[in-house]
Image (cartoon, rainbow, N blue to C red):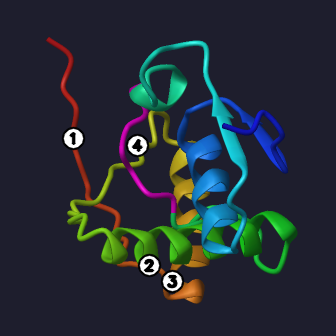
Amino acid sequence: MSLIYDIIIIGGGIVGLGVFRQLTLNGYRNVLLLDKSSQIITGASSGNSGILHTGFDTIPETLESKLVKRGYELYQSFAKDIELPIKKIGAYIIAWKPDELEILKQIIDTAHKKILTKHEIVPWQIQKK
């Protein structure tokens, strides 16, 4: 067994595993993945919400917006490749104060312009008990 590696990745979370996968798909064979745990995806990656970010609130045409969109597309492709079902169950963004409602409307307007997904404002009346 060779102890010489072309690339060593530190961290067996979602990012480390994603880098490992892409490198091996690109033909690298001497890649080592190191993690402090004896199991992968046990750190911060194990506690995520599982919601795939569509970039609904990113500023259009920024690097962040482009990278979020590309990451979303790559994850969709990856999930299909490994037959991982993705449930599109949605999420809530809550305006806690009346002045936050305008910000929420701007986020939804941006999302509609990007044609990412369906968004709507649902009126809720919260009563104090």
Question: Foreground mark, 1 or 2?
Answer: 2
| Residue that carries the numbered disc 2 in the rendered image | 77
Q: Position of residue 49 (x, y in %)?
A: 38, 37
| Residue that carries the numbered disc 1 in the rendered image | 125
Distance between the Cα atoms at labels 3 and 2?
Answer: 23 Å
Amino acid carrying label 2: it is: Ser
Q: Position of residue 57 (x, y in %)?
A: 62, 61
Residue 88 found in image quarter: bottom left
In the figure, 15 relative to 55: above or below? above
Q: Secondary structure at mark 3?
A: helix
Local crowd size for mark 1, using a 10 Å CA cut-off: few (<14), some (14–19), many (≥20): few
Distance between the Cα atoms at labels 1 and 3?
Answer: 25 Å
Residue 25 found in image quarter: bottom right
Q: Which residues are magenta?
A: 47-53
Amino acid carrying label 3: it is: His
Q: Earlier in the sequence, mark 1 or mark 3?
A: 3
Distance between the Cα atoms at labels 3 and 4?
Answer: 18 Å
Q: Are marks 4 and 1 in contact (CB under 8 Å)?
A: no
Horizontal side of residue 108 vs 63, given as left or right: left
Q: Main secondary structure of the magenta part?
A: loop
| Residue that carries the numbered disc 3 in the rendered image | 112
Local crowd size for mark 2, using a 10 Å CA cut-off: few (<14), some (14–19), many (≥20): few
Amino acid carrying label 4: it is: Ile
Question: Foreground mark, 3 or 2?
Answer: 2
Q: Secondary structure at mark 2?
A: helix
On residue 94, which mark appears?
4
Local crowd size for mark 3, using a 10 Å CA cut-off: few (<14), some (14–19), many (≥20): some
Q: Secondary structure at mark 4?
A: loop
Q: Position of residue 117 (x, y in %)?
A: 40, 78
